[in-house]
Every structure is written in C-alpha cells, then in structure tokens.
Image (spheres, rainbow, N blue to C red):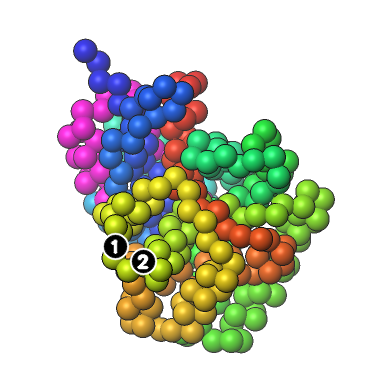
Amino acid sequence: MKNERFSVIDLGTNTFNLIIAEPDEKSFKVVHREQIGVKIGQGGISKGYITEAAQERLFRALKNLTRTIQAYQVESDRTWAVATSAFRHAKNAREIIQKIQTDTDIPVEVISGNQEAEYIYFGVKTALQIGETNALVVDIGGGSVEFIICNERKIHWKKSFEIGGQRLMDQFMRTDPISELDIQRMEIYLESQLLELSMMSFNYGPKVMIGASGAFDTLSEIEYRREHGDEHIYDFVDEFHHLRVKEHVLSIDDFHYICQDIVRNDRDQRLQIPGMIEMRVDMIVVATILIRFILEKLDLDCIRVSSYALKEGYLMRKMILG
C-alpha cells in the first residue's frame, strides 16, 4: 500500500524547515517537524549571492533532512522544496538549485514574493480563524517580509518587501547591543520602504497583527516562560522551539516588555533570556524593532501568533491541487 505522507522543505534564508504530514479529513496531521539554522544569507545576501560557506551549510542541512524524509518513507513524488528570497535574488541561485535537485532528487520551486504571501495566508487560515475583522498577517524571514491584509474570506492586499532580518542586520546592526542612533536610522528606512503598507492599512483598517514564523515563535516562548517558567513547556513548544499550539495571543504590553529586554542587551545577555534560542539570538533584535514599528505605526490591538505559515500553506495547496 502506498504511503500517503507528504513532505515540504521550506528553504528559508535563515532556516530550513521540514514538515512531514498525512491527510486528515479536510486538512493534515503533522507527523514530524524539523528545522536547521543555515543562515544562507549571511555574508552575501546584501551583495546578491550565496557564499561558499553558506552553500556548505545548505548542503549539509539538506543531507540531514533528506535522510529524515527517507526514514519516514515519503514517496519522492510527494516531496517538494520551496525556495524564497535568497534564491529569488542570488546571482548563483540557478546552479545551486540544479545541484540540490541532482543531489536529492527533490524538485525545487522558487516562488515569487506574491506567491509566498499567498501561501502564508493559506497556512495561517489552516491554523486559526482569522474572523471577519481585517487583520495584518506578518511573516519576517531572513531575506524578505510578507504583509497580507485579509479576513477569513479574502485577501485585500499582499506584498513581499526585501527587508528581511539578515538584510536589516547588515544595514543597521553595527554594534551589539544596537545603538539608539541605528534604531532611529532603521525606523526612518522602514518608514520610507513601507509607505504602501501604511496606505493600504489606512484603506482597510486592520485591527490585529497575526504573526507567522520564527521570530514570533521565539517571542511567544519567551512570554510563556516568563509567565509559567518551565511548567508544561513541551506542551507549548516542541524540541525545535516551534509552537505546538496552533495559536497564541501576545498582548501589546507583554510584547513591549520583551522587546525592551531584547533590544537593550548584548548577545550573551539575550541568550540568558528564558526561551531565547541561539539560532535567532541575533536576528531577533531587528525583527523585534520591525514588529514594534508596525504596531505603533498602525495602532494594532494585539498579536495573534500562528504556528502555521508558508510550508503549511504550500502543503495544503499541493495536497488539494497536486
């Protein structure tokens, strides 16, 4: 009997994420998750290429993830890799993708920023009820950030901006902790880059931010550990610090408290924050400043954190449409 499992690898700029799932009524049941920090944008993303060192990390990670997929006996025609910002813009992306496909026999689809935003929307919708009130979905990657103004029924507007965490770090994180001057420089830059987001938010009036992907997982875990310590922590996150719950609500007050703790401390001090993980300890600084900027600019009421994003939305589409 043919194995009904599916697998998707999200080839992100900072992290490679694997999901293995099987059909479950109108959705899917997650069988296995895994993530490996690769930082393929490090040292090259702002110059438009993926460095040799990053390629070594990339292929080492893929070797491990391919081994996992084989161990779970997922058929090759039900396994896909989806590539985002770093692969969209790197001059040497084509040759790297060819080597990935030759080495792993996994088809790689490089998706546009618009497609990425759409898949994120489908992922979020699979995890939680967005509701009739308009919300702003935010996914902060290493290379790009996706914004989607939407409700349960439709997307009003979506756009991908090349202002991801690695790019912002390269431009603005000249010291650690980041200086007040560089925070101001970054906020002026964000103001200029996100004019369309401000205009569309004025038109559609989102009230809530829905955060998807890594930085929001980490902020949620920090908030949970601050409130509950280690009690039942592995009911809340898995071994890779991905949310087990499909949704977590983060109050604005809690966010600002955590934000201050992250921004004012250096790397070693940030690592001492319960819930912080080494894979995100650097990029979380600029990600948190970006989130704070959006919350204040758009006067949003709270942050709903979705445990599903791009890879889950991509998986849903593949399971439905093939």
Q: Is residue 55 left or right of residue 69?
A: right
Three-letter code, disc 2: His
Residue 224 point in image, percent of width and height: 40, 64
The answer to whether mark 2 and mark 1 are in CB contact below 8 A is yes
Overall secondary structure of the magenta section: helix
Residue 141 is situated, as x and y percent measured from the top left of the image, at: 49, 56
> Given the image, on which type of amino acid does mark 1 rest?
Glu
- Determine which residue is flagged by label 2: 228
Q: Is residue 230 magenta?
A: no
Q: Residue at x 60, y 80 (%)?
A: 183
Residue at image coords 54%, 86%: 179
* Segment tinted magenta in the rendering: 61-85
Is 82 magenta? The answer is: yes
Q: Nearer the viewer, residue 44 or 25?
A: 25
Residue count near mark 1 (Cα–Cα under 10 Å), binned few <14, some 14–19, many ≥20? few
* Residue 236 locus on image (x, y percent): 35, 54
Residue that appears at 65% across and 81% down: 184
Which residue in the protein does label 1 denote? Answer: 231
Left/right placement of residue 82 relative to residue 52 reads right
- The secondary structure type at the circle numbered 2 is helix
Q: Quadrant of the N terminus?
A: top left
Q: In the displayed image of the protein, which residue is found farthest to the top?
A: 1
